[in-house]
Image (spheres, helix red, strand yellow):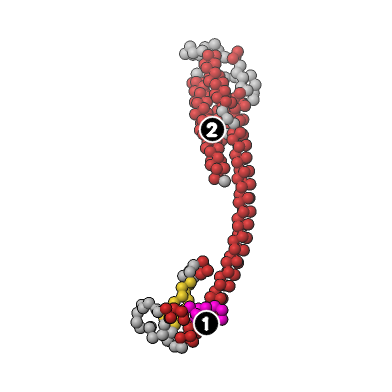
Amino acid sequence: MEELKKDLKALEREEELDKKKLEPLIEELNINLAELKNYELNEMIELPLLDDIISLNDLYELIESVEPEDYDSQKLEEIYNLEKNLSFNYDSLLEDSADGRNIDGLLKVYEDELASLRQKLLSMPTSSTVESELDEVKKKLDQLAKEHKEHLKELRKLTGEFEKVKKLRYDTFMKSFESIREKLGAVYKKITGRDSAQAFLLTVNPEEPYLDEIKFKFVPPNKQNRGPVEPSGGEKTLAALSLLFSIHG
């Protein structure tokens, strides 16, 4: 899933780079058209069209209204198609302007530049290709998310069953452990014949006591106040018998 997310981010970055590549081309087109418009206005030259598809002023306004986020939108495609189909009526223009500049030559320069821009735009990857790849990645992500959800559901089920077994194991063990521990003290006192004798069991792991050792401690009679003293062999034997009788008793 992480790999697919990385692929998705890479495609998104590629789409963003495509938009950034378009920005200077569109900016160049805007500058050229603006220069042509200014020259037309300054020299009082009207550029007639063969077809009345759209006026030049309307086309200028439409181009100026395009925002960067619209570069791959329907509006940009509409401008491109309108500009592509423009046809000027050169026959009605004067051969030269007031300052001697050749209008036909000027228009030819701009038309060549626009044709070059068109070629650059056509050679760039289309957003539809990127969108198609993104759709495929998103479908894979959706499928993986669905499988992940199913696995989580199964994991929760197995975890619940495991916890039930774990609790049953703990309860069964502690029931036996508590029974032995309760008997042990009384049996040891009875075997030694002294109420001062003590014997008890301790768990090392309170959460899962069956996984660790169980400590067996005893204090022989009349040795409670002598500090840590190594019990004799006979005392160890009596303590062991007490534990054995408690387990089987």
Residue appearing at x 38%, y 83% in the figure: 223
Q: Which amino acid, mark 2?
A: Asp
Helix, strand or loop status at disc 2? helix
Q: Give the x, y percent position of residue 217.
A: 44, 77
Q: Which amino acid, mark 1?
A: Lys
Q: Which residues are magenta?
A: 240-249
Q: Nearer the viewer, residue 189 or 182?
A: 189
Residue, far front: 233
Q: Which residue is mark 1?
A: 183
Considering only vertical position in the picture, is 137 above or below 189?
A: above
Q: Which residue is mark 2?
A: 18
User: Is residue 182 at least partly visible in the picture?
Assistant: no
**Is there CB contact under 8 Å for labels 1 and 2?**
no
Are there few (<14), some (14-19), or many (20+) residues within 10 Å of tag 2? some
Residue 134 is one of the magenta-drawn residues: no
Q: Give the x, y percent position of residue 235.
A: 43, 81
